[in-house]
Amino acid sequence: MPPPATYLELEAGRFREDEGLYYEDYIAGQVFEHRPGRTITTTDNIWSSLLSLNLHPLHIDDVYASGTQFKRLLVSSLVTFAIVNGMTVRTISQKAIANLGWDNVRLTAPVFVGDTLYAETTIVAKRPSGSRPGEGIVTVHTAGLNQDGVRVIEFDRNVLAAMRDRPGSAADPLGAVSAAEDERPVRAGEVRP
C-alpha cells in the first residue's frame, strides 16, 4: 500500500512528513483552503507591532483606540498579512525555492483582537523558468477571511517552485544538494533551500 500523499516512505513502515507542492502539482484554477484558522490575540498584535516598530497607538494603546472610529485596538495590517501569508506556506511554498514577491496587497476590512482568520489560495498561472532549469514560476492569489466570511486582506504572490526531478526533490528524500549545486556562487537575492 502506498504511503499517504503528504508522506515519503523512507523504509517499510517509516514515513517522513512531506508537505507542499512541486511545480507539476500546481494547476491554474485550483483553490486551496488553508486550515486550521488562527485566532488573533492581544499579544500577537502588541508584540508584533512593537517588534516591527509600528508604534501607531491605534495598535498598542487601548485608551487611544477607544477614542477612534474603531472603539478598540485595531490589529496591525502587518500582523494580518504575516498570519494569512504564513497559513499558506504548508501548501503553497513549503517546497518553493524562493518567494519572488507580493503584489496587489489590499486590506479590505479591519481585523480586531479575537477575530479568527482563515485563508484560501487560488492558483492563477505557472510557467517554466527561462533561466533556471528544473524550476518554474507560479502565481497565486490569496484571500484572508474572518470568522464571518468577510474578506479582510488579499494579495498576489509569485514563488519559484522546484520541479520533481531536480536535486532535493522526492527522488532525493534526504533533501541533499548536489556538490555542483552547493559550490555554485550565490547570486544577489537568491535563497537556497
Image (cartoon, helix red, strand yellow):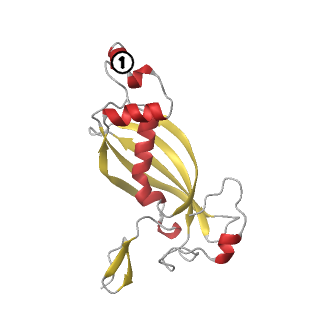
Q: Is residue 176 above or below residue 89?
A: below
**Place of residue 73 in the rendered image (x, y in percent of width and height, measured from the top left):** 34, 24
Q: Which residue is mark 1?
A: 65
Does the rendering let one see residue 107?
no
Horizontal and vertical percent position of residue 98: 57, 57
Say if 184 sits above or below 140 in the image: below
Q: How many marks?
A: 1
Dividing the image into 4 quarters, which one contains the C terminus? bottom right
Q: Amino acid at mark 1?
A: Ala
Left/right of residue 64 with respect to residue 25 in the rendered view: left
- SS at mark 1? helix
Say which quadrant the N terminus sits in. bottom left
In this rendering, position of residue 100 left or right of residue 43 = right
Residue displayed at 41% across by 45% down: 84
Comparing 147 with 65, the one in front is 65
Q: Is residue 139 visible?
A: yes
Furthest toward the top, the residue is 67
Q: Nearer the viewer, residue 190 or 142?
A: 190
On the picture, is 76 further left or further right than 180? left
Identity of the residue drawn at 39% across and 42% down = 144
Q: Position of residue 58 (x, y in %)?
A: 41, 21
Q: Please, is residue 82 above or below residue 123 in the view?
A: above
**Residue for point 31% across, 45% down:** 38
Residue under the image location 68 percent in, 76 percent down: 180
Instruction: Give neighbour class at mark 1: few <14, some 14-19, many 20+ (Cα, 10 Å).
Output: some
The foreground one among 30 and 60 is 60
Say left or right for 75 vs 162.
left
